[in-house]
Image (spheres, rainbow, N blue to C red):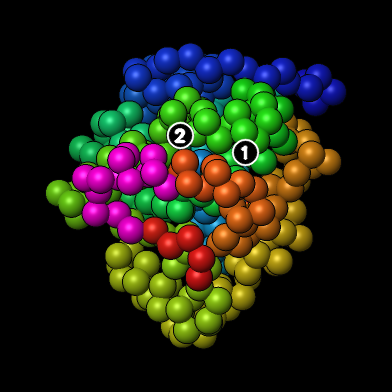
Amino acid sequence: DVSNDLPSREVLFDFHGVPMIHSFSANWEKIQNFQARPDDILIATYPKAGTTWVSYILDLLYFGKTSPERQTSIPLYERVPFLEITISSTDSGVDLAERLTTSPRLIKTHLPVQLVPKSFWEQNCKMIYVARNAKDNMVSYFHMDRMTLFHPDPGDWSSYFKRFLEGNILFGSWYDHVNSWWKKKQTHDKIHYMFYEDMIEVKLIYHILFLEKLCCFLGLSSSLEERKQITGGVQFDNMKKNNMVNYSTLQVMDFKVSQFMRKGKVGDWKNHFTVAQNEEFDENYKQKMKNSTLQFRYEV
Ligand code: A3P
């Protein structure tokens, strides 16, 4: 038990061309050889794009009715294991995933598409990818790195901003991540590509439509009533106070520094970017995304 023994900040190193830390690569052999099952569902995101939100939605869709007790007794990070994580004080993501007795297994990853274990492709598993506009994603990631005690030290905002543009942060370049998953989606029909901004659209009707699309991809039927109930349960304020989904039970995060459920908004970047940073970002973005058909919204 290392609960009184706070983890120290790790350093980034190059791992198959991606900036990585020990806690997400130490178990690589087992991760690479992970045996996916055909009905496994992989939830893939660049960190801070809405992983927890969509994980919770999927968990409710599959198990909300059949095992309501799991909602109040098992933290979401155990129901939806994080494939590549190995922190000594807890079980590895692979161990947790292998121990799941429910099906389908919902599995979370932040790996770029080229590093996803091959059995997920061989088994033709469904994959849900969530992308979030780079400006808000950067802000959210900055605060996550500040509060997550084993993540590399983010430094101050202006140096973080530079490193984000260079792709020199944990899990690498946002630009490469969203684009390579997007490219993969064009030739692989088992990837459902979603946007944080669409999920946040305030009008209830959009939430329900968005759930309808998701259910259609998953081959699930759900009643309007059920969908309404789910959209209520996954509202930001409800998730923020739900200890089974807000990560408050994890020791590796310092909630005095920042919250996991921090703001849950589109456009918080405006409170962080200076005018000069915004110009530099936009210029750089045009270059990096010039061959991409991906479109993001920076406000809704
Ligand atoms: P902020 O830091 O901008 O608030 P991930 O789960 O991929 O780590 O992403 C975390 C981000 O998603 C955080 O963004 C968090 O607040 C936001 N989020 C989580 N649940 C949400 C919800 N129900 N509605 C809106 N945003 C949510």
The location of residue 138, given as percent across then percent down, is: 54, 43
* Residue range (magenta): 282-295
Q: N-terminal of the two: label 2 or label 1?
A: 1
- Residue hosting label 1: 142
Between tags 2 and 1, which lies in front? 2
**Residue drawn 67% across the image and 41% down it:** 143
Q: Callout 2: few (<14), some (14-19), or many (20+) C-alpha neighbours within 10 Å?
A: some
On screen, residue 217 versus residue 237, left or right, reads left
At mark 2, the secondary structure is helix
Residue 243 visible in this rendered orientation of the protein? yes
Magenta stretch: residue 4 in it?
no
The location of residue 84, given as percent across then percent down, is: 48, 29
**Residue drawn 44% across the image and 30% down it:** 167
Q: Label 2 sits on what residue type?
A: Leu
- Residue hosting label 2: 165
On screen, residue 71 versus residue 51, left or right, reads right
The location of residue 80, given as percent across then percent down, is: 52, 46
Q: Label 1 sits on what residue type?
A: Phe
Is residue 290 or residue 215 the one in the foreground?
290
